[in-house]
Image (cartoon, rainbow, N blue to C red):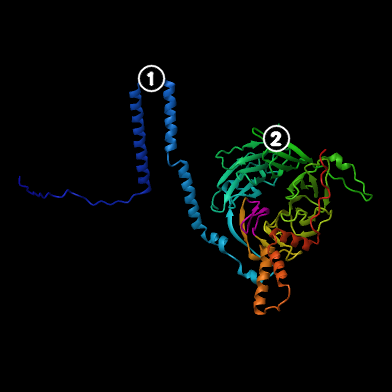
Amino acid sequence: PPMRDREIFTQPPPSISFGNTVTLCEVFDAYTEDLERQKIAKERAAVAAKVSKNVQKTEEEEAEEESAQRDNLKDIDIVHSAEMQKSLKIMERLLNQNTYDEIAQDFRYWEDASDSFKEGEGTLLPLWKFWSERARRKHVTALSWNPQYHDLFAVGYGSYDFLKQSSGLICCFSLKNPSHPEFSFATESGVMCLDFHPTHASLLAVGCYDGTVMIYDIRSKTNKPLFQSTVKTGKHTDPVWQVMWQQEDLSKNPNFFSVSSDGRVTLWTMSKNELQHTDVMELKLAGIVSEEGEEHEEASLVGLAGGCCIDFNSKSEHLFVVGTEEGRIHKCSKAYNSQYLETYDGHYMAVYGVKWNSFHPRVFISASADWTVKLWDHTSKNALLSFDLGNAVGDVQWAPYSSTVFAAVTNDGKIHVFDLAENKHEPMCDQKVVRKSKLTHLAFNPKHPILIVGDDHGGVLCLKFSPNLRKTEAQKRAEAMKNEGAEQVKKPPPKKKGGGEAAEDDDKKKQVNPAELEMEKLEKILGISSVEPVKNAPPAAA
């Protein structure tokens, strides 16, 4: 049959141009309606499944199913979900990066150009200030950087005014979000000290004013500690002034030490169900020595000496030093707890801080309320150096990058930074960073050239070192070699025989370990010999 083409034209359907502005409320309502539709669809599917199976359930089973459905709806709630919290945290950090952009740029790139014209001097640049509303009217009693995440640090809040004690607080701040703490935990008693575990970075040991020691997992969403000491498990009877993690024992159980005003140095071990304790040392009062060299018996009648601070030698694990309220420093051993290995008399008031040098195993430093900071060689009873800072010293710390740099904070709000390689008598930096507050503690960042200081008004301030304050021996030698190379280019030296041997010696010098350079530098400055074996070693076990 023949084919035909037929075409038809119709009227176009009516159309309307429509425009509108979508608000956050409308987006929220749309999501809510969608969730309701999903809920109704699930309920209809469940009813259809019931009808098809013809299963008769008891009232209790139906009630359980309804409660499970409610839980599922709570999980579906996007506003309070974990994903929403994570997204909000990222958004908050992005906004803070815009708010604190200038400070972040200074932290990353700022270098004080005036340091090149000022030899033997340096400055500190204030960066972020960390504060929490919950820490109002509390003192910063402890600071600790996280060993794994170098932007994260913990702050302990309590009170050094012993007539006005209240609850405590632990806040974990990040440099990425100065406006609000990442984690916070409330304690019944004031926090006096805390310390992060060196390998398990989420474990935080805490000591309180009432003598309790606790272990928190900062990843936990609950406010309860994993472990807590009680009267039955050997709780201290006085404030715990310092806690310090140590290497795991033979059973691979994490353990830490604590020192308290009750005169006990205690080892705490984390077992499966409880916190076990062992008293390593009881700090007996050292008697007053008369002119004839005899000790009075009055000291033995008084009781135990109150411990204020403790630190362990990084090279000799059994060796540790303890500072006391009476001003004495005792050298002790884990394996020899019947008496002190040595007692150092140099301070006249309480010793608030004692720290071993991280590069040299024989040198440690101490800070006291008698306005002085003293440098010691543990093989000698007399202090090597003494510095009068003009006010009570709250804390002292060695820098992690140099064997000769240390910093101390005083009650007049000043930070004193010393570099023994530049000046053994005066600080390179003596800077007042707070006006009407007393500085209580400080902590060096293990990676970046910054430190944090806390005051008695609950504030924590982050500061950056200028180039003169953070030079290492390796950097100084590299600069010297660079300058020598530039001079040799200008004036080439005469040729000598045996040039190959000289080149080999230069290669050996270049291959020297930076830690060995720091140790040699400190030995040269203090006039001490190379490392000797410990004289007062603990007796061998039978």
N-terminal of the pair, mark 1 or mark 2, is 1
Crowding near pointer 1: few (<14 within 10 Å), some, many (20+)? few
Numbered-mark total? 2
Nearer to us in this view, 206 or 445: 445
Q: Disc 1 marks which amino acid?
A: Gln
Residue bearing mark 1: 56
Numbered label attached to residue 99: none
**Residue 358 colored in magenta in the image:** no
Where is the N terminus found, in terms of image quarters? Answer: top left
Look at the image and tell me whether residue 326 can be seen. no
Question: Which element carries disc 1, helix, strand or loop?
Answer: loop
Q: Disc 2 marks which amino acid?
A: Gln
Q: Which picture quadrant has residue 500?
A: bottom right
Residue 277 appears at what percent x and percent y?
72, 36
Nearer to us in this view, 439 or 50: 50
Q: Residue furthest left?
A: 1
Region in magenta:
433-457
Nearer to us in this view, 51 or 107: 51
Distance Cα–Cα, label 1 vs label 2? 53 Å
